[in-house]
Image (cartoon, grey):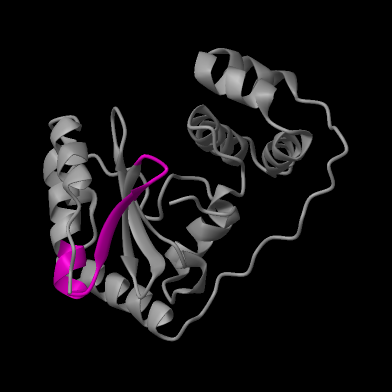
């Protein structure tokens, strides 16, 4: 039986005017495709669970919304898989600024049903290999970007060496400057929320 969480009602109500119809529409599609979905709030934004596992999540920022699947890397759409690998954007549909930025309802419902099937079959996302904790130098361009966001800078300074290294390696290993800049933007977004690079795979606290 589907469950709705009043905290998500409040999250949508507090979101920017442009975001409210986007979040409301995504929520409705998730419930339509997955009648037994369970709503909750994790890491301060709405999640949709199914069969006791995370399935997908949505979030709203100052100028865009995001929507993503927990097991996007295992789904059939090559674009979803690629975005899941590179993690260059929050979510797997890019930055959503209006309903027009969303795929068709038919395509969205297909995505959600595919994500349901992965949970039905008990398929798990492989955890990344642990990163050695030896300190690495932080590039000046990344440090400068962090300093422009007080919360991100403070969180990064307080991170354990392993978290700092994961972010630095992810950014410095980018082969193109555009990719590097997108990764930095994503990194600062996550760091400002106190999340490590591999926060998705860390032990979840409910």
Number of on-image labels: 0
User: Foreground residue, 43 or 57?
Assistant: 43
Q: Position of residue 132 (x, y in %)?
A: 84, 47
Q: Position of residue 120 (x, y in %)?
A: 38, 83
Q: Is residue 206 left or right of residue 38?
A: right
- Asked if 159 appears above or below 101 in the picture, the reply is above
- Asked if 53 appears above or below 175 in the picture, the reply is below
> Is residue 149 shown to the viewer in this render?
no
Q: Is residue 134 left or right of residue 36?
A: right
User: Foreground residue, 83 or 117?
Assistant: 117
Write the residue at 18% across / 63% down. Answer: 3
Q: Is residue 168 left or right of residue 97?
A: right
Tell me which corner region of the image, top left, top right, bottom left or bottom right, holds residue 106.
bottom left
Q: Position of residue 202 (x, y in %)?
A: 59, 53
| Residue located farthest toward the bottom when viewing the structure as drawn | 121
Tell me which corner region of the image, top left, top right, bottom left or bottom right, holds residue 49.
bottom left
| Residue located farthest toward the front when viewing the structure as drawn | 206
Please say whether residue 30 is one of the residues in the magenta stretch.
yes
Q: Quadrant of the N terminus?
A: bottom left
- Asked if 103 appears above or below 151 in the picture, the reply is below
Q: Is residue 50 left or right of residue 71?
A: left
Write the residue at 73% across / 18% down. Answer: 140
Please say whether residue 137 is one of the residues in the magenta stretch.
no
Write the residue at 42% across / 79% down. Answer: 118
User: Foreground residue, 93 or 40?
Assistant: 40
| Residue located farthest toward the right when viewing the structure as drawn | 134
Q: Position of residue 10 (x, y in %)?
A: 17, 38
Q: Which residues are magenta?
A: 29-44
> Is residue 167 shown to the viewer in this render?
yes
């Amino acid at each position: 039986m589907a469950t709705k969480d009043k905290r998500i009602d409040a999250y949508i109500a507090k979101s920017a005017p442009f975001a409210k119809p986007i979040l409301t529409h995504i929520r409705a599609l998730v419930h339509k495709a997955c009648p037994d979905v369970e709503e909750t709030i994790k890491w301060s934004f709405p999640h949709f669970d199914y069969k006791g596992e995370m399935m997908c999540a949505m979030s709203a920022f100052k100028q865009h919304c995001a929507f993503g699947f927990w097991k996007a890397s295992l789904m059939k759409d090559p674009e979803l898989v690629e975005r899941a690998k590179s993690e260059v954007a929050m979510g797997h549909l890019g930055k959503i600024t209006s309903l027009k930025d969303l795929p068709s309802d038919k395509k969205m419902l297909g995505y959600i049903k595919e994500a349901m099937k992965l949970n039905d079959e008990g398929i798990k996302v492989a955890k990344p290999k642990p990163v050695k904790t030896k300190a690495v130098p932080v590039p000046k361009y990344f440090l400068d970007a962090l300093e422009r966001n007080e919360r991100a800078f403070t969180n990064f300074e307080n991170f354990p060496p392993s978290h700092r290294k994961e972010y630095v390696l992810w950014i410095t290993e980018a082969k193109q400057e555009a990719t590097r800049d997108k990764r930095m933007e994503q990194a600062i977004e996550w760091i400002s929320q106190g999340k490590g690079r591999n926060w998705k795979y860390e032990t979840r606290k409910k």
